[in-house]
Image (tube, rainbow, N blue to C red):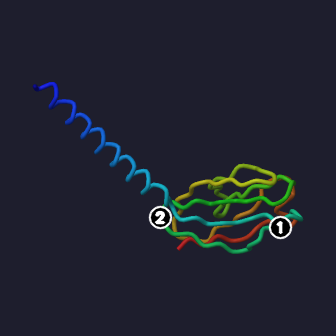
């Protein structure tokens, strides 16, 4: 008789575990806030010159390149490099950052992109 009681209890535990996993996965879908930037189809230009991001918390820098020319988005504060997205052409990529309050410089570090105008400021507040 104990064998029959074990199976329903086991199924109940699996069902509850599945419900917990599903609800935690659903919670993770929202993820960190997103900061969006794109390169134009003509290349050598970002769609925005200024961006804002939250201070002290993760945010996702989402870069979409509408050009077949390869570009990225790099971040620096003074001469300190904070990282970059992947260098891509005609696709999208994202990188997670957590930054302190301040005004950061963003630019494409590919070739002479920055000199051609692919730069701007990211204000973290």
Which of the pair 64/23 is nearer the observer?
A: 23
Q: Using residue 116 as the reference point, say whether residue 14 is left or right of it.
A: left
Circle 2 residues within 10 Å: few <14, some 14–19, many ≥20: few
Residue 45 is labelled as 1
Which of 63/20 is in front? 20
Q: Residue at x 23, y 34 (%)?
A: 10
SS at mark 1? loop
Between marks 2 and 1, how big is the CA–CA gap? 29 Å
Which residue is depicted at the point 44% across and 55% down?
26
Number of residue marks: 2
Residue 64 x %, y %: 73, 59
Asked where in the image residue 116 lies, by quadrant, the reply is bottom right
Q: Secondary structure at mark 2?
A: loop
Please name the residue shown 45% across and 55% down the image. Answer: 28
Q: Is residue 82 left or right of residue 120?
A: left
- Left or right of 33? Residue 111 is right
Rendering quarter of residue 78: bottom right
Left or right: where 80 falls relative to 9: right
Q: Which mark is residue 56?
A: 2
Q: Residue at x 83, y 67 (%)?
A: 45
Q: Position of residue 36 (x, y in %)?
A: 66, 66
Q: Who comes first in sequence, dot 2 or dot 1?
A: 1
Mark 1, Cα crowd under 10 Å, few <14 / some 14-19 / many 20+, is many
The quarter of the displayed image where residue 3 is located:
top left
Residue 6 percent location from the top left of the image: 17, 30
Does residue 65 lie above or below 53 as drawn?
A: above
């Amino acid at each position: 008789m104990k064998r029959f009681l074990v199976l329903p209890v086991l199924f109940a535990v699996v069902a509850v575990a599945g419900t917990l996993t599903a609800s935690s996965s659903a919670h993770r879908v929202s993820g960190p806030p997103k900061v969006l930037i794109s390169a134009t189809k003509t290349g050598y230009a970002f769609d925005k010159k200024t961006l804002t991001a939250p201070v002290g918390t993760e945010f996702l820098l989402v870069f979409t390149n509408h050009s077949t020319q390869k570009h990225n988005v790099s971040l620096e504060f003074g001469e300190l490099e904070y990282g970059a997205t992947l260098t891509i052409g005609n696709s999208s990529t994202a990188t997670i950052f957590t930054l302190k309050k301040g005004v950061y410089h963003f630019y494409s570090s590919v070739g002479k992109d920055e000199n051609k105008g692919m730069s701007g400021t990211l204000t973290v507040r």
